[in-house]
Amino acid sequence: MAANPGNKIRNAKLVLLGDVGTGKSSLVLRFVKGQFVEFQESTIGAAFFSQTLAVNDETVKFEIWDTAGQERYHSLAPMYYRGAAAAIVVYDITNAASFTRAKKWVQELQAQGNPNTIMALAGNKADMVEARQVPAEEAKTYAQENGLFFMETSAKTAINVNDVFHEIAKRLLQGQQAQDTPAGMVLNQRPAERMVSSSSCCS
Ligand SMILES: Nc1nc2c(ncn2[C@@H]2O[C@H](COP(=O)(O)OP(=O)(O)OP(=O)(O)O)[C@@H](O)[C@H]2O)c(=O)[nH]1
């Protein structure tokens, strides 16, 4: 649904974390540009994107940091998750080690991050069920026990990709109503847009 002109735009910093090759960049590319590439290059450092999403008559402008999964960039991660309103921790359903890594990211966020950060767990590559190593039920239980919401996604087929961002936007807006100044969000008064702006840099 398109937002009304003159509605509020809420800026929200969002970070993607997860093991190398789990599909973080691919999820962002799918969400921001509606595209998928089979041979997505590994991220160096981090890449920045922005995308707006309308929920009812309100608009969230996501400022997205897509971090590099390679271990050598681990020490940079706090720069990106600090002050984030939301985090998507990504694993690959065909790679059990990436689920173990995802749990470590959750632990780190819980220990170092902002307690108000909305956390999503995305089991990506859901189109590859024949190679599944992580049962959906196991991830769902883990997410419930740790205060995350969980979805299996596919950047390739687009299944649940917009839904993850939409659910985050909804929760951010609900949180906004409950709290006057939630961390990581800035309130602006600007004309409404629906998924209209996108940009990237720094990859
Ligand atoms: N089949 C399938 N392949 C995917 C999916 N998402 C990503 N890939 C592929 O997985 C590989 C890695 O994807 P990336 O998006 O680069 O993964 P990343 O997590 O950003 O990797 P780093 O930047 O190295 O941390 C690429 O070859 C993608 O085409 C998916 O949903 N399904």
Image: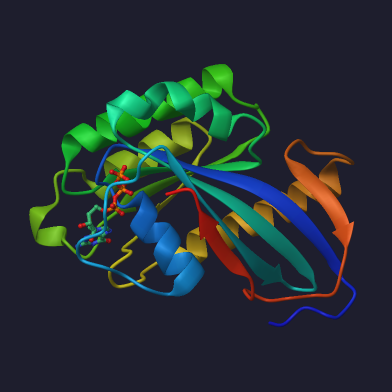
Relative height, residue 115 to residue 65 (above, below) = above
Quarter containing ligand 1?
Answer: bottom left
Task: Decide if residue 44 is on the left or right side of residue 169.
Answer: left
Task: Decide if residue 19 is on the left or right side of residue 30.
Answer: left
Q: Please name whichever residue, 30 or 122, is drawn nearer the observer in this view of the structure.
A: 30
Image coordinates of residue 121 in percent, x first then y, are: 42, 44
Image coordinates of residue 173 in percent, x first then y, are: 75, 55
Q: Residue at x 36, y 41 (%)?
A: 44
Image coordinates of residue 120 in percent, x first then y, are: 49, 45
Q: Residue at x 72, y 39 (%)?
A: 184
Task: Decide if residue 161 is on the left or right side of residue 69.
Answer: right
Q: How many marks?
A: 0
Q: Residue at x 41, y 67 (%)?
A: 30
Q: Please name whichever residue, 62 or 157, is drawn nearer the observer in this view of the structure.
A: 62
Q: Residue at x 16, y 61 (%)?
A: 128
Question: Residue placed farthest to the front in the image?
Answer: 202
Task: Decide if residue 140 is on the left or right side of residue 183.
Answer: left
Work out whether residue 151 can be spotted: yes
Image coordinates of residue 111 in percent, x first then y, are: 54, 17
